[in-house]
Amino acid sequence: MKTKFIFHILLMTAIVFLASCVKEGPIGLTGEDGLDGQDGQDGQDGNVTCLACHSGTTISARQFQYASSIHKAGTNVAYAGGRAGCAQCHSSEGFIEFQANGLVASDISMPSAINCETCHIIHTAFTYTDFALRSEEPVGLIIDQGVTVLDIGDGSNLCINCHQARTAEPQTASVAGATTFRITNTHYGPHHGPQANIFAGQGFAEITGPVTYPVAGSSKHLEQASCTVCHMDDYIDKQGGHTFKPSLAACQECHATENFDYGGVQFDTEEKLTELRDLLISLGVVAWYEVDQAYEPVPGTYPMVRAQAYYNWIGIEEDRSLGVHNPQYVNALLTNTIAALKATK
Ligand code: HEC
Ligand code: HEC
Ligand code: HEC
Ligand code: HEC
Ligand code: HEC
Ligand code: HEC
């Protein structure tokens, strides 16, 4: 884009230069006027359409908000943004290629962090309409090769291209009737951002137990809110807008609460997560790994329910909303998983 912009300036300068350059001979010997220069090519209507976006605070306000988003920091772009298998979610180039072609054909040599152009189609028509989102299409779940399609609202559909699980839960991932599951490495799990699955109540290990699972699609937040409703409400107090951080103001449109721990749900979820982790440690499924400074699974072959329990624990942990995304589903998963582990101990 920079080159196009500079080209535009050069073009304008050339036009001005041609207009003022008239041949004149020495005084008293004025010769005939030279031929008129050819009209320069019209520049793009820069002043009109560029300014539809490049004026006021349209861009700068979002840049300011976006500066505090982890998307911009691009913490893992160098590590995962270039790899063909990871780039669709971990770099701007990868996401744009994936949205256009349905795959990332090969590694990307100079991956960049997610930016305005990743999510908006800027500099195409060169009008304000270029702020349209790169995609608002419903999104197929990776865990069942796209059989389940989620349609959770325009801007939020964009988010769930990336914020969803990549690996199905152990039972679904195994041959029918399998009673054991092999965890092959310490990074096993749904991958770090299974928010769409939790939000929609899709794809975790629904171990039977005392709490009945809510019918998929019945969650109140799924019905009434969405990723953008909670995470992109009007920017206020360093939350919402293009910070992508959930905002308390959004919650308060529906709840009388002074924090995200409405009804004590986050506190309760945290307690259950700790209890489940400690059960997994006592069963030898999870250990503290000094090198990674993290609780990780111990590779090995486990009874199915223990592998499923691990999947649920790490997935709910990495969803990071502590139950808010789907309070009833998370409560059922954790309560039933804990009960099942206790019963088989
Ligand atoms: C849809 C709104 C929109 C329109 C119309 C638009 N731009 Fe942009 N432009 C953007 C956004 C958004 C960025 C990226 C800002 C960022 O990365 O933080 C950008 C970036 C740029 C940059 C890079 C420097 C910078 O500010 O980051 C240049 C140069 C530029 N635009 C020139 C133009 C010119 C010239 C036109 C008209 C021919 C134009 N733009 C029309 C939205 C627009
Ligand atoms: C379907 C999209 C998707 C794909 C494909 C994907 N990731 Fe991710 N990854 C994410 C999201 C989303 C997050 C951030 C989740 C969050 O912050 O809640 C993430 C986070 C990470 C993190 C940070 C973990 C942490 O604890 O902070 C690493 C490292 C990572 N991914 C590596 C990879 C690698 C390596 C690959 C390819 C083998 C890959 N990812 C493929 C979506 C994806
Ligand atoms: C991760 C994706 C993402 C990134 C990155 C992003 N945006 Fe957005 N942007 C959105 C979504 C989604 C909406 C619609 C929000 C809603 O529905 O409430 C939006 C809305 C907007 C709007 C309002 C458009 C309208 O219809 O009036 C503007 C302007 C805008 N973004 C500018 C920017 C700029 C400038 C940047 C870079 C500094 C940027 N965005 C980066 C996702 C993104
Ligand atoms: C192109 C893939 C992609 C899209 C689209 C995307 N994200 Fe992300 N998001 C990520 C990755 C990757 C991370 C983690 C950054 C890292 O670890 O490198 C992340 C991090 C986050 C975080 C962590 C906190 C922070 O400050 O950024 C939130 C919240 C988030 N995303 C919300 C959203 C929402 C809401 C949308 C839709 C409007 C969205 N994301 C769209 C890939 C994406
Ligand atoms: C009902 C409101 C609500 C909805 C809907 C919602 N979120 Fe969240 N989200 C939250 C809250 C609250 C947190 C936890 C924030 C905290 O405790 O600091 C959170 C946490 C997150 C995080 C981790 C952020 C971090 O910094 O640790 C990501 C990523 C995220 N949400 C993405 C999404 C995506 C993607 C969607 C749509 C599928 C979504 N959220 C829908 C409220 C919501
Ligand atoms: C558009 C409306 C709407 C928004 C916005 C919204 N919620 Fe909700 N939420 C609901 C509804 C409806 C219920 C189910 C009825 C109830 O428990 O109040 C619910 C239930 C909950 C529950 C379960 C309460 C319990 O005791 O079981 C929690 C926790 C929750 N919301 C947290 C949040 C947080 C945190 C935010 C903001 C980040 C938020 N909600 C934003 C509509 C909303």
Image: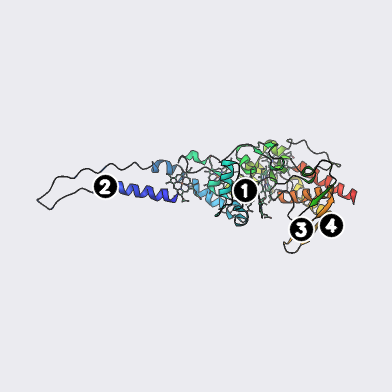
Residue 180's mark? Answer: none
Which numbered disc, 1 or 4, marks the residue that appears first in the sequence? Answer: 1
- Return the residue at label 2: 18
Spatial CA span between label 1 and label 4: 33 Å
Q: Are marks 3 and 2 in contact (CB under 8 Å)?
A: no
Q: Nearer the viewer, residue 197 or 93?
A: 93
Spatial CA span between label 1 and label 2: 49 Å
Could you tell me the amino acid type at mark 2? Leu
Beta carbon of the mark 1 residue lies under 8 A of ligand 2: yes
Residue at x 30%, y 43% (from the top left corner): 40
- Return the residue at label 1: 89
Residue at x 79%, y 46% (from the top left corner): 170
Which numbered disc, 1 or 2, marks the residue that appears first in the sequence? Answer: 2
Residue located farthest toward the bottom when viewing the structure as drawn: 290
Could you tell me the amino acid type at mark 4? Gly
- Return the residue at label 4: 284
Beta carbon of the mark 3 residue lies under 8 A of ligand 2: no
Residue at x 63%, y 43% (from the top left corner): 159
Q: Alpha-carbon neighbours of circle 2 within 10 Å: few (<14), some, or many (≥20)? A: some
Q: Are marks 1 and 3 in contact (CB under 8 Å)?
A: no
Element type where label 4 sits in the image: loop
Could you tell me the amino acid type at mark 3? Tyr
Quadrant housing residue 199: top right
Residue at x 53%, y 47% (from the top left corner): 116
Establish if 272 lies above or below 146: below
Q: Nearer the viewer, residue 188 or 106?
A: 106
Q: Nearer the viewer, residue 147 or 233?
A: 147
- Return the residue at label 3: 295
